Image (cartoon, rainbow, N blue to C red):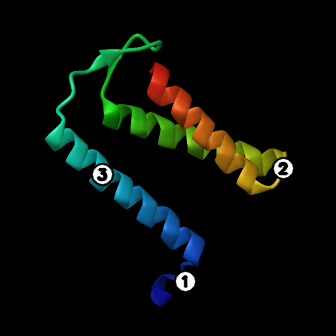
C-alpha cells in the first residue's frame, strides 16, 4: 500500500466497501429477492438500495466538508441514518 500513499482510514473505507459487496453478493445468492417498489416509484433490490445509500453518503460527506457543519464523525452518523431510511423506504 505504500506505493499508493494510502492512509489507514482510506484503506479501511475501501475494505468496508469490498466487504459490503461480498456480503450483498452472498445474500443475493442465498436469499434471492424480488424487486420492490418504494417511495421513488421504481423497483429496487438490495444492491440498488446499497448503491443509492453510498451515493447519498458521498454527497452528504462532501456537503458536510464544504459547509464545515461539525466534525466528520457526525457526518458518519448522518450517513448511517440516511442509509437506514433508504433501506426501509426506497
Reply above or below: 15 against 3: above
Res 5 label: 1
- Mark 1 or mark 2, whichever is nearer to me: 2
Element type at marker 2?
loop
Q: Is residue 17 left or right of residue 74?
A: left
Name the residue: 55% across, 69% down: 10
Distance CA(mark 3)–CA(mark 1): 28 Å
Mark 3 or mark 2: name the one nearer the start of the chain: 3
Question: Which label lies toward us, 3 or 1?
Answer: 3
- Residue on which the image places disc 2: 70
Occupied quadrant, residue 71? bottom right
The picture places residue 39, in percent across and down from the top left corner, at 47, 12
Residue 43 picture quarter = top left
Q: Nearer the viewer, mark 3 or mark 2?
A: 3
Query: In the rendered structure, which disc, 3 or 1, sits on the residue that comes first in sequence?
Result: 1
Q: CA distance from mark 3 to mark 2?
A: 32 Å
- The answer to whether mark 3 and mark 1 are in CB contact below 8 A is no
Q: Quadrant of the N terminus?
A: bottom left
Residue 64: percent from left, percent from top: 75, 46
Count neighbours of disc 2 (C-alpha within 10 A) and say few if under 14, some if 14 to 19, many if 20 or more.
Answer: few
Viewport quadrant of the C terminus: top left
The numbered mark, 1 or 2, whose residue comes first in the sequence reads 1
Give the answer, above or below, for where 66 lies relative to 55: below
Residue drawn at (74%, 49%) of the image = 74
Amino acid at each position: 500500500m505504500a506505493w499508493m500513499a494510502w492512509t489507514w482510514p482510506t484503506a479501511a473505507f475501501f475494505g468496508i466497501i469490498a466487504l459490503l459487496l461480498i456480503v450483498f453478493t452472498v445474500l443475493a445468492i442465498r436469499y434471492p429477492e424480488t424487486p420492490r417498489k418504494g417511495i421513488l416509484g421504481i423497483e429496487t433490490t438490495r444492491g440498488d438500495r446499497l448503491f443509492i445509500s453510498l451515493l447519498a453518503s458521498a454527497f452528504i460527506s462532501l456537503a458536510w466538508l464544504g459547509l464545515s457543519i461539525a466534525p466528520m464523525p457526525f457526518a458518519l452518523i448522518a450517513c448511517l441514518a440516511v442509509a437506514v431510511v433508504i433501506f426501509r423506504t426506497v
